[in-house]
Amino acid sequence: MREQQKKAFEDLPEFSFHQFENNVEQSINLLYEVRTFVPTENPYIVRRGPFNYVRKTEEERIKRAEDIIKRIQPGPYEDPNYIALLAYQAASIEMVWPEQDQDRFQGIIFGTVHIPEVNALATPSITTGVTSIAFHSAIIDFVYQAAKVVVEALNPMRGQSGVTVETFHDKILENLKNNPSPIFRFYKTLEKYFYFGYPRAFFNEEIKDEHGPVLSILVSLAERWIIAHEYGHNFAQGRNFHMAQNPLWAEEYFADQNATILSVLSAYELDAIAPEFALSAGHFVLTCLGILSKTETILKNENEPVDDIDPFHPPISERADQIINHFRQFFDVNYNNNKMLPDLTFILREAPPSNHAFGRELSKRVFFNSNILNLIWSHVIDLLIKQKQSKRKLHSIWL
């Protein structure tokens, strides 16, 4: 991974940052800068932006993120901004893991590599027992840009009770007609990726205050789901997937299952966020991957594909559909408690029950952000097909 980071740093000079022999101290400083909180009238509660946290728990999470940075020892070609963000989300995952099994995390290290492929890879070592996870910067950047597209389309408005968003499909369509900016943003992001080789079309943008809370939840939980998925590949070591029809697919489903459990638990216990938001973020990540796969095929062949046959990964649409089943298998939930948060119970089951309180209406919330992104993409693809028809050449990474 260190060699990958060095080569990527040399190949993509626009991602330069101040280099030290290692970036441990710089990453930790950025962690504390980004995660600064302020006290409230309640001495046990602190606030960061519009969100409240239990002081003791949040202090523990930040300290654990610092310890993770020290554990992975980011080197001179690590971007401290990325690692500070990811360490905080990794800490969220590790904190909800059983206390008696915390030693397993000492065998997981990770880093970010400025590679244009939207992906993350976990590489376990049989000899050392250490799993090295490389998060490509492109997956962080693309999910972030896609999330900004959706949030802008939702037209967040600040009212007396906080920030509200548009939830009616017809109204969102009307807003896109009156303000096609989200369509343009997604087009430019995809154009930048497929024709210039990296999915970052916008630099150093200021986020509107009313967009911040919605964007923060979606992006943070999406990053957390990605990390928990890659952790899942570490947890898969030693498990017998050979009885499955495709062992590689079985491990991917296992990693998705792990991501669903840990993102839901951590969002609920540490951030007081209801399960549907964590599930929605995981579904959103997979939707992003699906859109990229379909866009690649369209720009190469001018036809929209079904899921490609991949010997290493199950069809993305099937993985996305399974997220709710993973949740139903391992959680019981009660929304009829007259509280802001539902009652949530983790439970070990071999399969989801035939009847579950997380029904159709709640499932719609899981698909909401993904449906908006697909809606916007349906407007973007005609613009990209025109580029294909004009014989515009794709970037060399796609050839």
Image (tube, rainbow, N blue to C red):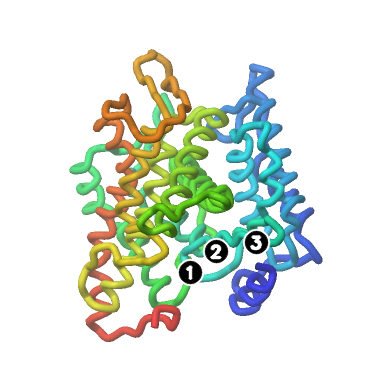
On screen, residue 157 above or below 135: above
Q: Residue at x 29, y 75 (%)?
A: 299
Which three-letter amino acid code belongs to the residue tagged 1?
Glu
Q: Residue at x 49, y 60 (%)?
A: 139
What residue would you read off at disc 3? 125
Residues 73 and 253: in front is 253
Which quadrant would the C terminus be assigned to in this image?
bottom left
Quadrant of image for the N terminus: bottom right
Q: Is residue 148 visible?
A: no
Mark 3 vs mark 1: which is more N-terminal? 1
Q: In the figure, residue 129 lies in which quadrant?
A: bottom right
The crowding category of the residue bearing disc 3, from other C-alpha atoms within 10 Å (few below 14, some 14 to 19, many at least 20), is few
SS type, badge 1: loop
Which quadrant of the structure image shows residue 367?
top left
Relative to 81, say whether 385 is above or below.
Answer: below
Instruction: Give percent across and percent down for residue 194.
Output: 39, 74
Please report contact status of discs 2 and 1: CB closer than 8 Å, yes or no. yes
At which x and y percent is residue 111? 64, 59
Whole-percent x and y of residue 324? Answer: 34, 39
Kind of residue at disc 2 = His
Q: Which residue lies under the disc numbered 1?
A: 117
